[in-house]
Amino acid sequence: MAEAVAELGPVQLLAAARRAHGAAFGGPAVLAAWAPGRVNLIGEHTDYNGGFVLPMALQLGTVLVGSPTQDGTISILTTSAEADEPHRVQFLAPRQGSPLSPGQPRWANYVKGVIQHYRDDGDLAAKALACQKAEHTFAGMPCGIMDQFISVLGKEGHALLIDCRSLETILVPLTDASLAVLITNSNVRHTLTGSEYPTRRRQCEEAVAALGKTSLRDATMAELEAARSRLGEEVYRRARHVIGEIARTAQAAQALQDRDYRTFGRLMVESHNSLRDDYEVSCPELDELVAAALEVDGVYGSRMTGGGFGGCTVTLLEAGAAERAQHHIQEKYSGGATFYLTKPSGGAKVLPL
Ligand code: GLA
């Protein structure tokens, strides 16, 4: 893997968080933890369909520090590169008979949800499922399990193939020095995201019911074709994406294992086209970034990554082409892009203080 660009890692973030804690609460933090962000290499909108995903944890992430309080209240303060001023909120700690509930400010809802649902039982899968529940019930986002799983189970030097039906995982090595993973942030986020994601989930459920299955993981392309006239055209195309993407992700994990980057890249492009045309979660900016990346010599493949309607693309390329690719993409892109060259990193952990 190519060297990563300098980004704030856990060490720098921890120092900043400890300073912010001291300034806001007048005493030192006594515990600290780190959780990485993720990029999904392939397997999009498959997690809530019982399919495969292939994400890796990043060196970019979130640090949390804290200290106990005695007065039955919880205060949360958040700082980020985007906000000039930290945001702060205070609420009563949950007690028996008076659980926390989501409200204003909205940014605190996910944290509140984790406080409400998380119980420290040492089981990483249970921890991820509790965080997913927080996202469903407090943040109002009916997400799958990919983000939480890779965040707790990420391993340095590896992508993680997650079977979202059995919750079994397989580590796939990704340490080849001749290879790079380039993340390109479109720096756009279309407001559609909120309403379109639940709509896609509902359409998948509709297809599952019409096919008489428990999930799209169990359906074949032949079964879908046979049922085409019974499904609306849109629901048919949504299901076609999911069934195809689940197969592509299994093939891609094998190709990565075999260091067959050409096949991996081809599957990435097929994934993007399917997300654009059948699942309709791409946007002109992401399409532009992918098209520009594919013009560069040494690029194996490129695709939108994550939920869609903005956000990032992920590009697999020869390490030697990384510089060239960034210049070319920036030159062709009508907006302003941000680039991250990153290595697969470890999962969430407690940081020593
Ligand atoms: C969002 C969700 C994930 C997953 C992706 C699409 O990131 O949080 O669970 O569904 O979209 O693959």
Image (tube, grey):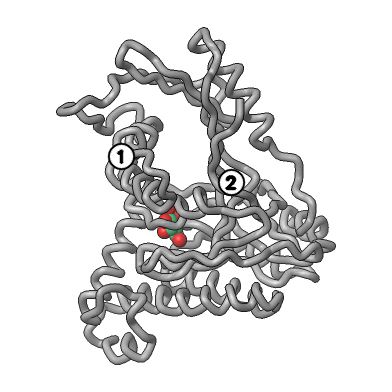
Q: Earlier in the sequence, mark 1 or mark 2?
A: 1
> Which numbered mark, 1 or 2, is in the foreground of this view?
1
Q: Residues within 10 Å of mark 2 (few under 14, many from 20)?
A: some
Query: How far from the left and from the top, in percent, is residue 218?
Result: 33, 79
Viewer-proximal residue among 8 and 85: 8
Q: Most extreme residue toward the right, as rendered?
A: 320
Q: Is residue 302 rendered to the left or right of residue 116?
A: right
Check residue 117 in the rendering and tell me which mark sits there, or answer none.
1
Using the image as rendered, state which of residue 100 and residue 230 is in the foreground: 100
Task: Using the image, determine if residue 35 lies above or below residue 155.
Answer: above
* Percent of width and height locating residue 105: 35, 27
Quadrant of res 300: bottom right
Classify 142 as above or below 172.
above
Question: Residue type at mark 2?
Answer: Asn
Mark 2, residue position: 187
Location of residue 239 by image quarter: bottom left
x 48%, y 23%: residue: 66
Q: Residue at x 68, y 35 (%)?
A: 8
Assign the N terminus to one quadrant of the image: bottom right
Image quarter where ligand 1 lies = bottom left
Picture coordinates of residue 322, whole percent (x, y): 79, 59
Q: Is residue 308 above or below residue 77?
A: below
